[in-house]
Image (tube, rainbow, N blue to C red):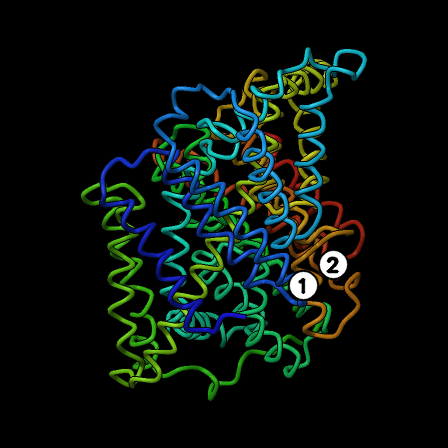
Amino acid sequence: MPSKYFWTGFGFISIIFHLTLIFSGLVPNLVSRPLHMALALPWAFIFLSNTPLQRYTGYLFTLLGLAATFWVAYNADVLSDQYGYISQNYQLWIAATLLFCVLEMARRCIGWPLPMVAAIALFYGLFGQHVPGEFGHPGTPIGSFLGTLTIAEGGIWGKLTGVSVSIVAIFVIFGAVLNAGEAGQGFMNLALTAAGRLKGGAAKVSVISSALFGSISGSASANVASTGAITLPAMTKLGYPKSLAGATEAVASSGGQIMPPLMGAGAFVMVELTGIPYQSIMLAAILPAILYFWAVWVGIDAFALRYNLKAVSKDQQPSRRNLLITCSFFMVPFSLLLWGMFGPAYTPQFAASIAILGGALLLFFNSKGLSNKQEFLNRIEDVGTNAGKQIAMIASIILCASIVVGVLSITGLGVKITSLIISGSSGMLWPAILLTAIACLILGMEVPTTAAYVICISVAGPALSQLGLSPLQAHLFVFWFALLSTITPPVCGSVFIAAGMVKENWLKVAGTAMMLGVGLYLIPLAMIANPSLIQLGNSPFLAILSALKIALALYFISMALIAPFKKIKRALYLLIGIVLIFGFSI
């Protein structure tokens, strides 16, 4: 196994490559995207190896993958003239190698479900002409099918991979730089100061810190593991029920994937798929995200009526001086990011590059002054290793999802599923939304949120648009519902992690999480019933008015579900909440 110095150095090669692309002008897509995959291969196949067999096969797959990706990058000019058609037998082997490596990368990084979906899609593309009825396809020559997926700017080198190369990787580097310094402590100190003294303060600290940390991590699991290491022991020591402690952390951490600016890479994929500027998507997503955390906050207040949820003791809260110093470790980079995007209106990746520079300079400092040499070197090691690993993880997911999207496009299956949704809903919007929500929930249980969103929007997006939704409504709705599986049984990753950390039955944690996270189920529907909610950029007054109405609705519904009220009062509160969301729109 290569040493940690190798991985740190290799991580910085990945960082330098992706940052260089931002400043180097136009690099051909068939050069940058294969090299992006090449940089991900060793992380997926060697770094994540746990057994000698995995390591030895990992070296083999890495060598084969590197040979194939470098061949594509080296021959980019020639391949662009082939228009996605493989004319040589050896090119078929290269195509097969690339596809197999993508499937195996994803399997090693995130498990079987997504690669299985992609493998079924490939099988359908190759043999779907033998499927009887309307869901078969006429058949595509193997040279054209494999070529479109592997040697053209479609398939695994398509738009989604372009997003991973040019935007997602940059924000992953940004998150790695912030996490290596004291930004995480700044988040925690701000949360302790803002909410620690309140009733249920330890749980509310979890909500605020998870919202802040999740805005740069974009990963529910990473959020639970990091903020949960501090908030879960604090809650259990104060006597909170373990199921409530675990649920609070799981639900709050899941919100990181809907909290701008990162949104688990979803925002950047949305930019590419909709053509809507990133700044507009960020503005559209911010009020629903705030409402989500508001619903969790109200849920904690409702649980406080059941249990004696104590505040955090004063001696555990940071001093004002410590708060100001530690908050600067995330406020400076965040301010640079927002200034770059909304001041000179730079591209998100250029603004993030400036913020990365600001965050990198802060690595020289800690809350007491200058970092010592060892502390600085440890931070540099964290940046290189975490950035390289996270870029590879997201690349593996997006490359694998790109296979599915490519097959849907080549075979026309996406159009057929769209027609099925429209006919199954009898051309009515709300039944179509229900069908789409079920599909998102089922698919989200098996594959990562971003991949589930990409696949669902590819097949359901056109149907929702035909039934009257704006592109932004459709995309945000699908993205939110793809996230349901983080807290909804039977597959609820955030709940499993949090339940393990507090040593509680995961079903108890999941039941509590679903009540606390009721906003995750209702807010996407509220976006449909109240279109002005996502129009903060165009109609700020109406958007805020709509958000206040939905905030009131979530208050009533959360209280009805959680607070120890009598049945009549519960029913009344529930009815008021439903009427506020669906009865009239602003």
Which residue occupies 42% across, 32% down? Answer: 272
Q: Secondary structure at mark 2?
A: helix
Q: Which image quarter is the N terminus in?
A: bottom right
Q: Residues within 10 Å of mark 2 (few under 14, many from 20)?
A: many
Residue 581 visible: no
Whether residue 317 is visible here, answered yes or no, is yes
- What numbered label is drawn on residue 247? 1
In the rendering, which numbered label is found on residue 27?
none
Q: Amino acid at mark 2?
A: Ala
Total number of numbered labels? 2
Relative side of 573 to 171, left or right: right
| Kind of residue at disc 1 | Ala
Asked if the residue under mark 1 is in contact with the one under mark 2, i.e. CB atoms within 8 Å, the reply is yes
Task: Residue at 46% x, 73% y: name it.
Answer: 4
Q: CA distance from mark 2 to mark 1?
A: 7 Å
Q: Is residue 456 above or below residue 512?
A: above
x and y percentages locating residue 179 in the rendered image: 41, 67
Classify residue 445 as left or right of residue 26. right
Q: Circle 1 sits in a helix, a strand or a loop, which is it?
A: helix
Residue 149 percent location from the top left of the image: 54, 28
Q: Is residue 310 left or right of residue 336?
A: right
Tag of residue 510:
2
